[in-house]
Image: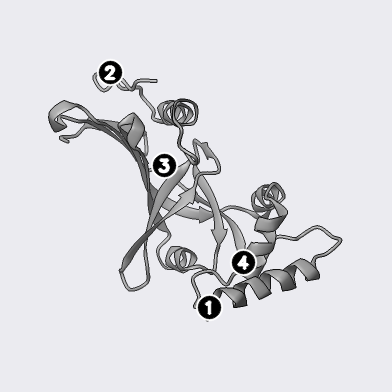
Amino acid sequence: MDFDFDAPPDTPLDSMRAWLRDAERDTDLPNPNAMNLATVDANGRPSARIVLLRGLDERGARFFSNRESRKGDALKAHAHAALTFHWDVMLRQLRIEGPVELLDDEASDEYWNQRPRGSQIAAWASRQSRPVPDRETYLDACREMTDRFEGCDVPRPPHWGGYRVALHRVEFWQERDSRMHDRMVYVRRDDGWSIERLYP
């Protein structure tokens, strides 16, 4: 679905969902829901990594992770993040910025129970972002967790769960010839959305 930069809709959510559907339907990307998550740690140092979008609604964009990871530590220190989808084959980029909140146990359990068992085992075995002496140490931990949960469901670790990035700033970017790109930004206000076209 093309975004009308000359007559943008009053709110961004439907267009965001349409661009995500286009990426899922019209590309050969293995993970069209992959997004770059940027955070700032307690010392003001930025970092970025790719995570997968696991839901989008008017409250924000959801993803799940180990909350004791580097990203988890950063979000504890500064509960604000930026997300970027870059669909190069579609010549599009979608950016989201906003405060971050933890998803509740019910939402985290619901997604956890959909994960493959191997991924559940790996989540228990990995001390994400911490040093590990060699791969075999990690594989030994995976085998230990496999034995520990043999014959039963794998429960969600207490340190693993979901996050939601609120839609406080949303930007649509469309590549054009000669770098004369289109950019439109939505900023949430108390009374709705402000909408502005930006220079590329």
Q: Residues within 10 Å of mark 2 (few under 14, many from 20)?
A: few
CB under 8 Å between discs 3 and 1: no
Q: CA distance from mark 1 to mark 2?
A: 53 Å
Depth order, front residue of 87/82: 87
- Classify residue 47 as left or right of residue 161: left
Residue located beneath label 2 in the image: 7
Q: Quadrant of residue 138?
A: bottom right
Q: Earlier in the sequence, mark 2 or mark 4?
A: 2
Residue located beneath label 4 in the image: 159
Q: Earlier in the sequence, mark 3 or mark 1?
A: 1
Q: Earlier in the sequence, mark 1 or mark 2?
A: 2
| Looking at the image, residue 61 lies above or below residue 197 | below
Identify the element where label 3 is drawn: loop
Q: Residues within 10 Å of mark 1 (few under 14, many from 20)?
A: few
Depth order, front residue of 137/178: 137
Query: Where's the C terminus, which quadrant?
Result: top left
Q: CA distance from mark 2 to mark 4?
A: 45 Å
Residue located beneath label 1 in the image: 132
Question: Which label lies toward us, 3 or 1?
Answer: 1
Q: Position of residue 139 (x, y in %)?
A: 64, 71
Residue shown at 72% from the left, 55% from the top = 117
For badge 4, the amino acid type reads His
For badge 2, the amino acid type reads Ala
For badge 1, the amino acid type reads Val
